[in-house]
Amino acid sequence: MDHRKNPNWGGGHSKKPGKFNSPQKSGVAAPVRTQVNLITNNFKIKSQNHGVIYTYKVDFLEGSGSGGGGSGGVDNPSFMSDDQLNTSMSSLSLGIGNKAGLETFQKFKIMNAHKDQIKKIFTQYVFVGNNLFSTELIDQQLTLETQKPFYNRYYTIIIERVSEFLLDDLNRLKMTEHPFALSFINSIIKSCLRNSKLTQIGRNPRFFMPEQAKTFNDTVMTWPGFFTSSWIFQRGLYLIIDNISKFLSVDNCFAIIQERLQRLDKNQVSREFDGAIVMANYGQKRTYKVHAIRWDMSPEAYFFDQGDDNKKVSMLSYFLKAYETKITQLKQPLFEVKQKRQNIYLPPELCILVGIPPKIAENKRIMADIRQSLFQKPSDRIASIKEVNKMIARSQEVREWDLNIQLEPDEIEAKILKRPNICFGTQGTALKSLDDTNILRQIVHQPINFQKWAIFCLEKDVENAKYLQDKFYNLSEKNNLNIFVDFGDIVSLHNKSRIDDFKAAINSYFKEYVSQDSPAKGKKKVPTPAGGTPQVQFFLVIIPDTLRQEHFYTALKNKINYDNPVISQFVTSKIIEKDNDRIYMNIVRQINAKLGGDLWRMSFGKEISKKTMLVGIDVCHKGKQSIIGFVATYDPFLCKYYTQASPQGQKGQEIISSNILQEYFTSAFQAYRDYNKGELPDHIFIYRDGVGDSMRKQVIDFELEQLKKICTDEYGSDSDKVLPQITLIIVNKRVRQRFFEKTGGQILNPPPGTYVDQGFVEQSEVIDGKFDFFLVPHNVTQGAVKPTHFYVAENSSRISKDAILNFTYALCFNYYNWPDSIKIPAPCMLADKIAIYRSEIGNIPSNIDLHKLPFFL
């Protein structure tokens, strides 16, 4: 018998035919292994002549707008005296009028125009950025005067030797000991690839094979390709090669614009292309970010200044002469692209949209086909990588510099971590190994009763709503979840209701049952139950199949978060009608987690203090703004998180400002105090995601210093106050490193728990608490697995390297939305999740109490 009370707004029982699907049975645990032999995508680079490479700094001093003159022309290079050089370099460093603010491509153009003259001096050289590399030693400072204007100015090129290195030494140095060396190697590799049959897209070393493109739905195509980079590991200098893909529209952008104009107005089409990335389908296939569509411009009417003499040229004649490309649509609008110095304009007819169109992204069938096409078996991936490496190793460019790139990838012995334990029992003292992870699909460690909740749906979905209640109740009892599921109030709307009708219904219900007063923005909403009704725990919304799901979800979530802050869960009517027990179980457990009930608790080992605060920080660059995601635990089991998210000051910014860090950590410390009777943590464990290798040092130096200041303020500066120990780990999941198991003549994905902490890392031994490692925490059933890189930037505690490895691995099992290990530790995933939520939804709950719950799961 059902002992749930009758609802106030509807409810009741409804039985549907069909059998329940029983939970999947646990599999047999695989035999435990402790080490594995790995093959990598790294190819050793050595020098054949063991020669010296000299590095020269190249500066460009801006001269007058007429007449070259000077101490020597390009056919007669001169060497400056020390006094002349000091005067010129002083002006340059002080920024006095004649300093040239040239872009990289402009410097390259000037140098390329003088390559014959420069070759007479250096014989063989590579120019990258502001550096010139050569085997020739020129001790004196060289100056060249341009004999024709560039960008309407004349320039003095100053070349000065600044350092040198032996190619052989690169196999013994650390990355930080010679920052320019990799630019030299990468330039040689890029030059080789440019001269191959591959097609470069953009300026980075990413090269593709358009002849092997695959097309889907006659709308989007994928170009397979390769990424290359040189890197200095502990083992030495290596070439890294990995497979990549580029998504491109089949139609050109003008055809897409015409299709959109058949159903949208110009303003709507402009919004669709605002910020879109397009590829120029000519020349070097460069990519651009569209700022606007200029409907008032056209190719036939657009003239611009070209060349150093600023001669007027039409867009039509320019493309015909420069690229042998004829523009056929004379009256099409133009794309406006903002550059640092000026705007440029592109004809949409000669551009291709980069990425997957929203319509295709929403089509699960097509997306499944696309994903399937991208999957490569480990053996196929290694084979294709080896072919590209062979082409590079045997190229003229590599031979000219006497480099020797080995044809076979390196191998390494790696170790496998034991799977962590999970806590059982009310006290959480009983432990069970996670060798079989199916157990995570079925348990709820801390059940939260569904006592007062509401379902919002159309009239035609009322039966689905009633059935949903019964399923929740029955599955909880059947699986011993110990969640008491009371009837939810059913708020039905007429079948032609739109989004605004749902908003009004939710608002009405909220005012009557949750809060009758509207406090000021930012203040805590205090519930005032009507007639003794308990505060509503969550809203469940059945998404109508007659409305666009994504738009409906975003609009309603935004409304609930801002005006009616309550935990919410959305489900489609089609999902309910599938009548799949596994799906219903996932929904019940997800709601339980959103309400603050832990689904499981991990055992992290004796070295992890019960007074640890676990922090996850990520900066997500998706969308129009970069968003900071921040989460911090406040319970001893490292399951309950305080969460926040907000925009960065500017798009692409990685370093987080001191005032935001202050606000976030202060609130996190208060949440910790509230839960732990005024106590503060004695160890702060931070996983910082969203940091590229180039920005790592800057982020560490700035954010670590800010954190230490915040801790001093929070804990007090008295001598008897003990500041918390800090462990800061930089997480990088966008690595190009690949590891595959080599066993019995087969190449397979390595097992979960495989880690590499020597050879192909920057630092294996622990020095001043610092070291790094690669970890494969998860399993993939299709394609090739990608490891995650962890760099321990600070560790003021006595916790061991092994404990950090095991703790990191265990945290990859602690994300409640997936009943197994994931690619990154749970705090990183949660920080990423709330950042994306903030970016896509727009608002996070205005009720600060909800920030202590994972409302965004």
Image: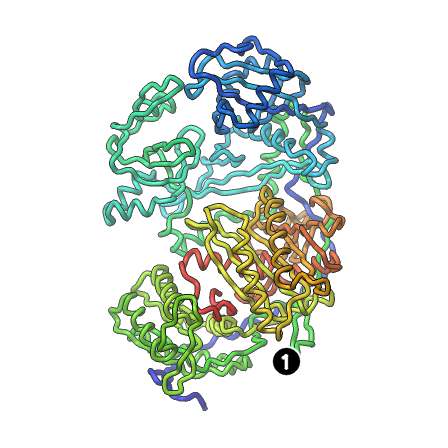
Residue 290 appears in the picture as rendered = yes
Nearer-the-camera pick, 595 or 530: 530
Question: In this figure, which residue is indicated by the disc labeled 1?
Answer: 426
Residue at 46% of width from left, 73% of height from top?
Answer: 584
Tell me the kind of residue under disc 1. Answer: Thr
Mark 1: few/some/many CA within 10 Å (<14, 14-19, 20+): few
Residue 502, image quadrant: bottom left
Left or right, 357 with reference to 125: left
> Residue 602, position in %: x, y?
64, 69
> As displayed, is residue 370 above or below residue 149?
below
Left or right, 447 with reference to 777: left
Residue at 37% of width from left, 17% of height from top?
Answer: 309
Residue 531, image quadrant: bottom left
Residue 16 appears in the picture as rendered = no
Residue 299, image quadrant: top left
Nearer-the-camera pick, 90 or 794: 90
> Residue 115, position in %: x, y?
54, 17
> Residue 231, position in %: x, y?
65, 38
Nearer-the-camera pick, 375 or 644: 644
